[in-house]
Image (tube, rainbow, N blue to C red):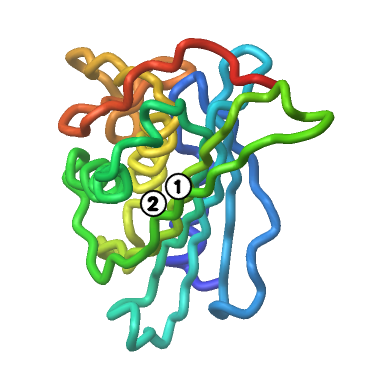
């Protein structure tokens, strides 16, 4: 394992995030790059998952022409929306701005960002007719993080920004700003960690658990 990739992975493993986040490693894709590491996460409120996603770190020591770098971050984020949110015709553009805004709010340099925002609606019939219509939004995106000293990007800060996005799409209010003297990865404080969502527009807070 190249030293730069090892440092990037170690930073992902030790990053501290909001207490609502449940994060664990998962099997990465095998053919996208010579080296890969992945985590999956959910934003949890009691027994309910408000949003979930996966973040994959790719590394090609030889560099990749499309990436314009040796590292690439790839993500999938999804959540169910309230009907009034889903009716907003500008929601896809707003959701994309949450991703770029989360990175920029933490002062992270990145390039070659690309992705899609997809909305899918479900209506229920027959034995499921009592369920209310549901709309799920899905963000698929990738970007090239700027490499720092030693050739490794600040993956802990990128993971924190990604968690900001996940909490944003889950409808959580922004976390409190960092107190003076806070330590740890950018935006993380305390044993469980809290991350600041400053500079990113919030979804309205959810009313409660979605219908089963």
> Which residue is labeled 2 in the image?
155
The quadrant of the image that shows the C terminus is top right
Question: In the displayed image of the protein, which residue is found farthest to the front?
Answer: 126
> Which residue shows up at 29% across the image and 29% down it?
187
- In this view, the residue in front, 122 or 1, is 122
Q: Is residue 192 above or below residue 34?
A: above
Q: Nearer the viewer, mark 1 or mark 2?
A: 2
* Callout 2 crowding tier (Cα within 10 Å): few <14, some 14–19, many ≥20: many
- In this view, the residue in front, 202 or 158, is 202
Quarter of the view holding residue 35: bottom right
Quarter of the view holding residue 88: top left
In what element is the residue under mark 1?
Answer: helix
- In this view, the residue in front, 149 or 122, is 122
- Whether label 1 touches label 2, CB < 8 Å: yes
Looking at the rendered structure, which numbered label has been put on residue 11?
1
> Which residue shows up at 37% across the image and 21% down it?
194
Q: Is residue 128 left or right of residue 5?
A: right
> Which residue shows up at 52% across the image and 41% down it?
136
């Amino acid at each position: 394992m190249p030293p730069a990739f090892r440092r990037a992975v170690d930073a992902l493993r030790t990053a501290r995030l909001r207490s609502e986040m449940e994060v664990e490693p998962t099997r990465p894709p095998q053919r996208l790059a010579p080296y890969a590491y992945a985590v999956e996460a959910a934003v949890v409120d009691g027994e309910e998952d408000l949003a979930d996603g996966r973040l994959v770190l790719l590394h090609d020591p030889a560099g990749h022409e499309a990436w314009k770098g040796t590292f690439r971050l790839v993500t999938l984020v999804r959540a169910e929306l309230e009907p009034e949110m889903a009716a907003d015709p500008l929601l896809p553009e707003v959701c994309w701005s949450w991703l770029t805004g989360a990175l920029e709010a933490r002062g992270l340099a990145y390039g070659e960002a690309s992705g899609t925002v997809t909305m899918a609606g479900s209506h229920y019939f027959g034995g499921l007719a009592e369920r209310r219509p549901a709309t799920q939004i899905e963000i698929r995106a990738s970007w090239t993080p700027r490499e720092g000293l030693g050739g490794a990007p600040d993956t802990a800060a990128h993971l924190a920004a990604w968690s900001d996005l996940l909490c944003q799409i889950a409808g959580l209010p922004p976390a409190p700003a960092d107190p003076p003297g806070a330590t740890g990865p950018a935006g993380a404080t305390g044993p469980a960690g809290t991350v600041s969502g400053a500079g990113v527009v919030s979804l309205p807070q959810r009313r409660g658990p979605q219908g089963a």
